[in-house]
Amino acid sequence: MPSSFPKDFCWGAAAAAYQIEGAWNEDGKGPSVWDDFCHRPGKTYLGHTGDVACDHYHRYREDVDVMKQIGLQGYRFSVSWPRVIPKGTGAVNAKGLDFYSRLVDSLLEAGIQPWLTLFHWDYPLALYQRGGWQNRESVEWFGDYATLLAKTLGDRVHHWMTFNEPTVFMNLGYQGGEHAPGDKLGNTALWKSLHHILMSHGKAVQAIRASSPQPCKIGWAPNMGATIPVTESTADIEAARTSFFSVYENPFWSVSIWNDPVFLGKYPEKPAALAEDNWPQPEPGDMELIHQPLDFIGCNCYSGGHVRAGKDGKPESIPWKTGAPAGTLTWLTVMPEALYWIARFKSERYGKLPFVVTENGLCNVDWIALDGKVHDPQRIDYVHRYLQGLKRAADEAIPLGGYFYWSIFDNFEWAEGYKSRFGLVHVDYETQKRTLKDSAYWYGEVIRSHGANI
């Protein structure tokens, strides 16, 4: 049976610098807000840190061999900003840059496309102490950082992402205090930060295009939970679409707040019900900077919820069923239709750019069995179901660009430490031994069939 997926569709997996690299203070690396946060008592599960993590900094060649063994076509990774520019601006750390150069070379030698993310939460501590995202100068700081990477890696890296999940690092790191840097800012500071993050995205897109030695493809990786119509009636679909793009009572979680400026060049209209005095008032040129042409629509998606049309047609959320299938973290309930509806709704609103699933995966409590293998049938079933939803999008001619499973390795799950495992590959954190799980072998067959076996 032929595959529904486009010929140039990229099958990959993803990881992030702080979650796997370790070597937190080696070879000239500067501290990040996550280094600082994890070293404060009581901030993470059992005091876990990313100091060593998967020791990827020292074991990257072995790790690329594992990726090749699975058959990955692409690997999405992030660069640690303070590893390459220890203070965030100014002097460049040659050893840090060299690590990423060697990683990219190893990926290419293995026939794996490098997909580089500029920022996956490990903000330079020195810049945070200068105001961080609240400081309008952060736009230039980030642009200079992007320029450096484009000039040094752009001859080999074709695919770029600016930010990973700004919604999460903003809400959990700066509003709720559960993540680094652990702040609980008021709305004035949050709106200012949001606007500067979006401007920094646009500045980085400009910098990459101006500095890359070759043509490249650029997007970003926002996260969002799917809103899934409880039936496929016109009313329920419209209710789910409306809910997906609505501005919530806490606007910083809203899909449209982050994506409308990037893809449409404007903020959504402020809802009359939102008593908010700090709605963005951009300066001349700000929105033009944010609204840079992109080459794909990225999305991190794990879960979602059902929506129906109420009596007046307004969206009504349906609570998750008691005992619904779920991962080991509270926010991940299994919703197999999620990728289809997000691909459809985002493509309808933001245009026919290729839709790339930049993260999707299941957290579980995997261990090595008596036979020396790691059996994770729930993960296989989860991914299979979600890919069936993505296949439906392909069957309906929604443009698709790739799928990146999260994560290639078990790793440091931020404030949750090491208690949940997302990886296709099991990591023994004491010995650093890598063991391919059943899901890794299954996913390898998916890749070899180009999704025909979905």
Image (spheres, helix red, strand yellow):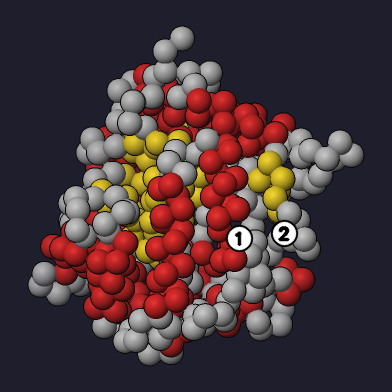
Residue 236, image x, y percentages: 42, 28
Residue 225, image x, y percentages: 48, 45
Q: What is the C-alpha distance between the residues marked 1 and 2? A: 9 Å
| Residue at the spot 70% in from the left edge and 39% down from the top edge | 437
On the question of residue 58 being in view, the answer is yes
Q: Is residue 144 left or right of residue 391?
A: left
| Residue at the spot 26% in from the left edge and 75% down from the top edge | 144
Q: Residue lying farthest bottom? A: 130
Q: Is residue 191 left or right of residue 441?
A: left
- Foreground of the two, 435 or 127: 435
Q: Are marks 1 and 2 in contact (CB under 8 Å)?
A: yes
The first of marks 1 and 2 along the sequence is 1
Q: Residue lying farthest top? A: 1
Residue, disc 1? 59
State which mark lies toward you, 1 or 2.
1
Image quadrant of residue 96? bottom left
Image position of 267 with respect to 376: above or below: below
Q: Is residue 331 left or right of residue 300?
A: right
| Residue at the spot 31% in from the left edge and 44% down from the top edge | 297
- Give me the disc on residue 432: 2
Mark 2 belongs to which amino acid? Gln
Residue 178, image x, y percentages: 59, 71
Image position of 78 with respect to 75: above or below: below
